[in-house]
Each structure stands twice: as structure tokens, then as C-alpha cells.
Image (spheres, rainbow, N blue to C red):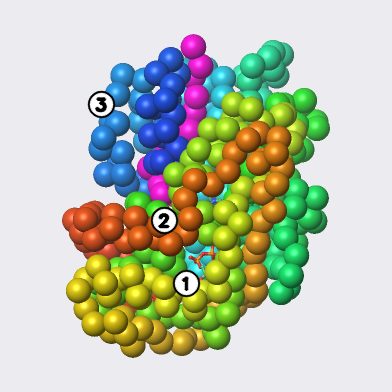
């Protein structure tokens, strides 16, 4: 029986990973450790909360005593680590919070994992779920491969790069079995509406301005979140220890082109005249240190582990918009309270 600790399982990607593992692997005991920050929401997991192979642990990865206690009690033989502060704009305003959770929190988990299993690493694995932002920014051409040097530009990406380095250091120094994946921008159901796609869906619904940073020509590679959850399942089960796998959608969009597509789809779905939502687009001050372009070469995971994205973007975006339109209560819950203060500070 595998006891798997998944951290950050109440967040956007984590909740899809938890659901995938709980439903697909009834023989595993899945423990979801989450602090329930503004980004964590147990409402994301209502459908599986009564499953017999699922346990929720409310705690903080930076609380060393708590982490020590749960490792001793549950003897996790595998960790899939997603808990993090994840939003670049917030990292610009409060970099220390990102260093604390993303670097120190990761180290505390690594340390307890090492203390527990150092004398017997057999069938143990620490999986760090990371980001393509560690590679920095691309120019107009080229792709990030697993060999691209780290060159992070934001406090968020610097903290994730640092945590990747600590995972590798534990592998080298203590022989700890680990695997890392670096993924591109996710989108889909349960996405917190501080990120581009859910923020703009919410603003179109509310007929509020759509704040495009800079000239809108920044480029991202988008992947449907359930495809990412399946990739994590694949890497966890088939990935080779000490390897890194890049995960991406081969799906690059300039922000402004994506926003125009989103506006068009939403006008149709909301029975508004074509061109209505587009009028909400407002160019605003650029993000400091804004990376021009991210694009992932996902050949390795495709050729070596057989993973590929299942959806084309237009289909995924349409499904995502439908999810938000059908889950207004979820959206209202997460946009009340703290969100209002954040929104005011970030956009006024
Ligand atoms: P998210 O912000 O939606 O969720 C993060 C989760 O971590 C929340 O449930 C939150 O409560 C929890 N958390 C935060 N601090 C914690 C702490 N100190 N202790 C315990 N739990 C804590 O993030 P996400 O977008 O789902 O990203 C998940 C992971 O995937 C992150 O590590 C992120 O760096 C990585 N990632 C995200 C993307 C993306 O596009 N969103 C892409 C690649 C990689
Ligand atoms: O690449 C993977 C990363 O993708 C993850 O590691 C991060 O956790 C995740 O937040 C995401 O980072 P980005 O900064 O790329 O995502 P965001 O949705 O914040 O921004 C996407 C693009 O849209 C980026 O070029 C900035 C732009 N943008 C964003 C917001 C919130 C705007 O133009 N206006 C906005 O209001």
C-alpha cells in the first residue's frame, strides 16, 4: 500500500491531481496537505471528500514541527509536492512570502522525507511539480528543453528555481530518489481568478475592463489542467529518478490573440452581440520584469513516457468558459473577501 502525500491539493492544479489519484488508484492512501491560503479551497474537492482512500490534513509546509509529526504518523513513502505561492504579480509585491513557502517549505518537506527514509530509499520518491518560468524568457524563436539553463526573472520563478535546486541537492547529497517536472501555463476549471484566463472570464461576465499588460504581445504556452494532472500521473509512475520532464501544450498564444478569442467565445455563450466583450480590453501598465515568451519542447515526455495533450486549445477554452458560467457560486465565493482588496491594489 502506498501512502502518498500530495501538498497543495486544495489549489487549482492540486485538486485535479488529487481527483485523478483518488479515483484511479483505490489501493493508494492519498493525503492532501494544504494550508488553505486564499488560493486553497476545499470546495474544489467536494466530489471526492468522502472517498475511503482520501484524507485531508490542514497544515503549513513551513511549520517544521507539524511536518515532522505527520511524517512520523503517516510514514508517507512518496511525496508529490505542489504547495506554493503561485502568482507572479503577488511575488512582485511580497517576495518574502514566496521565499518562505516555496523555498523553506520545500526544504522542510525534503528534510523530513530524508530523515524518514535515508536508510531505505527503495520504492520511495519525492516529486517536485515546478514551472517553465525557471528558464527565464525566450526571444521570438526557440523552445525550452530540459537542458536549458535556469535564468529566472521574477521573485516567484527565482523561488521555484531555488526549490528545484534543493530537490536536486538532496538527490546528490543524500541519494534521495526524486523527479522534477517543469510545466507551462495551465488553464481550466477551478482556476483562481487572479490569473489571465479566469480573471478575464470573470470580468467579461461582470462587464468590467480587461487589463492587458503592456502591448499584449507577450506569449505563453497553454495546457489544459487535466492534461497536466495526467502528465503528473505519468511522470510519477513512469518517470526515471533524477530526471526532469518538461510538460507543455505545443500551444503558443500571444496574450492579445488569446483575449480576442476568449471575447468572441464569451459573446456567443452570453448571447451578446459579437464585439461587445472586445470593447472591454484596456491596455494597462506593464508587469515589471515581464518575460516576453515561454514555449516548451515537450518531446521528451512524449517520446519516453508516451504522454501527449488531449485537447486542442479552442475546445479547452470553450469547456473552461462553460465551467465558469455553470459554477457562478464558486466564482462568487472566491471573489468575495480578500480578493476584492487584492483586485483594488493590483488594478486601480
Ligand atoms: P494555487 O495557487 O492555485 O494553489 C496552491 C495551493 O498551495 C493552495 O491550495 C494553497 O492553499 C496551498 N499552499 C500555499 N502555501 C502553503 C503552505 N505554506 N502550506 C501548505 N499549503 C500551502 O497554485 P497552482 O496554480 O495550482 O500551482 C500548483 C503548483 O504547480 C505550484 O507549485 C506552481 O508553482 C506549479 N505550477 C503552476 C502552473 C500554473 O500555470 N498554475 C504551471 C506550472 C507549475
Ligand atoms: O508558465 C507557468 C506559470 O504560469 C506558472 O508557474 C505560474 O504559477 C502561473 O501563474 C503562470 O504565470 P504567468 O505569469 O504566465 O500567468 P498569468 O496568468 O499571471 O499571466 C499570463 C500572461 O498574461 C502574462 O504575460 C501576463 C499577462 N496578464 C496577466 C494578468 C493577470 C495580463 O496581461 N493582465 C493580467 O491582468
Q: Which residue is mark 3?
A: 50
Residue 302 inside the magenta-drawn segment: no
Above or below 225: residue 196: below
Q: Secondary structure at mark 2?
A: helix
Q: Find residue 287 and name its label.
A: none
* Residues rendered magenta in the picture: 1-13
Q: Quadrant of residue 343?
A: bottom left
For the question of whether residue 306 can be seen, the reply is yes
Residue 87: % across, % down: 49, 61
Location of mark 1 (residue): 258
Q: Which mark is residue 316?
A: 2
Q: Closer to the observer: label 1 or label 3?
A: 1
Q: Earlier in the sequence, mark 2 or mark 1?
A: 1
Q: Label 1 to label 3, Cα distance in Å?
A: 38 Å
Closer to the camera in the image, 244 or 234: 234
Judged from the image, the secondary structure of the residue bearing numbered disc 1 is helix
Question: Residue 296 at x, y = what percent?
Answer: 66, 56
Q: Earlier in the sequence, mark 2 or mark 3?
A: 3
Amino acid at each position: 500500500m502506498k501512502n502518498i502525500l500530495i501538498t497543495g491539493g486544495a489549489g487549482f492544479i492540486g485538486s485535479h491531481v488529487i481527483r485523478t489519484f483518488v479515483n484511479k488508484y483505490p489501493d493508494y492512501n492519498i493525503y492532501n496537505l494544504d494550508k488553505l491560503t486564499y488560493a486553497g479551497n476545499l470546495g474544489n474537492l467536494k466530489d471526492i471528500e468522502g472517498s475511503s482512500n482520501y484524507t485531508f490534513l490542514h497544515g503549513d509546509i513551513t511549520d517544521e514541527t507539524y511536518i515532522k509529526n505527520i511524517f512520523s504518523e503517516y510514514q508517507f513513502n512518496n511525496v508529490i509536492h505542489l504547495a506554493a505561492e503561485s502568482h507572479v504579480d503577488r511575488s512582485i509585491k511580497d517576495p518574502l512570502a514566496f521565499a518562505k513557502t516555496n523555498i523553506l517549505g520545500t526544504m522542510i518537506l525534503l528534510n523530513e522525507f530524508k530523515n524518514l527514509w535515508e536508510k531505505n530509499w527503495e520504492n520511495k520518491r519525492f516529486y517536485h511539480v515546478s514551472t517553465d518560468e525557471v528558464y527565464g524568457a525566450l526571444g521570438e524563436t526557440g523552445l525550452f528543453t530540459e537542458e536549458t539553463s535556469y535564468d529566472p526573472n521574477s521573485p516567484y520563478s527565482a523561488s521555484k528555481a531555488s526549490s528545484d535546486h534543493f530537490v536536486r541537492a538532496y538527490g546528490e547529497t543524500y541519494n534521495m530518489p526524486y523527479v522534477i517536472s517543469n510545466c507551462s501555463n495551465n488553464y481550466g476549471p477551478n482556476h483562481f481568478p487572479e490569473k489571465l484566463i479566469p480573471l478575464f472570464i470573470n470580468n467579461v461576465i461582470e462587464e468590467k475592463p480587461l487589463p492587458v499588460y503592456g502591448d499584449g504581445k507577450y506569449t505563453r504556452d497553454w495546457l489544459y489542467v487535466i492534461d497536466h494532472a495526467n502528465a503528473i500521473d505519468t511522470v510519477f509512475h513512469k518517470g526515471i529518478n533524477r530526471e526532469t520532464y518538461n510538460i507543455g501544450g505545443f500551444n503558443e498564444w500571444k496574450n492579445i490573440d488569446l483575449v480576442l478569442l476568449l471575447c468572441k467565445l464569451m459573446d456567443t455563450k452570453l448571447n451578446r452581440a459579437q464585439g461587445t466583450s472586445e470593447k472591454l480590453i484596456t491596455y494597462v501598465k506593464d508587469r515589471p520584469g515581464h518575460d516576453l515568451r515561454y514555449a516548451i519542447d515537450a518531446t521528451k515526455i512524449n517520446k519516453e513516457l508516451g504522454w501527449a495533450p488531449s485537447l486542442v486549445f479552442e475546445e479547452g477554452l470553450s469547456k473552461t468558459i462553460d465551467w465558469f458560467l455553470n459554477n457562478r457560486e464558486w466564482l462568487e465565493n472566491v471573489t468575495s473577501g480578500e480578493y476584492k482588496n487584492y483586485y483594488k491594489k493590483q488594478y486601480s
